[in-house]
Amino acid sequence: MGSPRTVVEKHWQASESGNTEAEHAIYAEDAILDYPQSGERFRGRTTIAAQRGGHPADRHFTVLRIVGSEDLWVSECMITYDDAPTYSISIMEFAHEKVVHETQYFADSFRAPTWRTALAEPMPNRHIDRA
């Protein structure tokens, strides 16, 4: 199946290309997906695939960073829903080469307050959007 990092990379590539079968091959049959911000829990690979497959927006995934070791991997992504960008953090826990638990957090971008102007510099390949 490959290293967990390779499996996570392939998951995001499949998510971006719309290959739902490959996207969900990463999950154990009884995997759990949690969205703490909404309080939702999705139990089982089939349910996880169904809730993602039913999403009405045109979605695109850009992986910004993947870090981890052994059985815990974190992906930092930009997900665009109908051209509106949202940052996402995905925490994936593996057992027996499959994801058994994933927690995803979502955050919209925001404008930087002017009081921090003298303290901040732009992140690589980014600009600071001021309030």
Image (cartoon, rainbow, N blue to C red):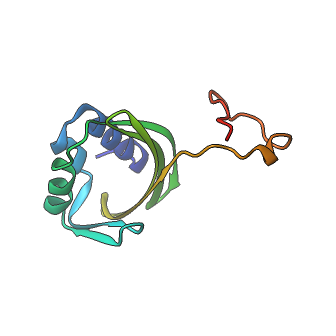
Whether residue 128 is situated above or below residue 112 in the rendered picture: above
Say which quarter of the image contains residue 112.
top right
Residue at 43% x, 46% y is 5
Residue projecting furthest to the top: 125
Image coordinates for residue 35, horizontal then vertical, percent:
36, 65
Residue at 30% x, 70% y is 40
Say which quarter of the image contains residue 123.
top right
Say which quarter of the image contains residue 91.
bottom left
For the residue pair 94 and 127, the one nearer the viewer reads as 127
Residue at 71% x, 33% y is 122
| The C terminus - image quarter | top right
In the displayed structure, does residue 38 sit left or right of residue 110? Answer: left
Q: Say how many tags the image has.
A: 0
For the residue pair 59 and 24, the one nearer the viewer reads as 59
Whether residue 27 is situated above or below residue 14 in the rendered picture: below
Residue projecting furthest to the front: 131
For the residue pair 114 and 96, the one nearer the viewer reads as 114
Residue at 28% x, 40% y is 15
Image coordinates for residue 59, horizontal then vertical, percent:
30, 38
Image coordinates for residue 105, horizontal then vertical, percent:
44, 59
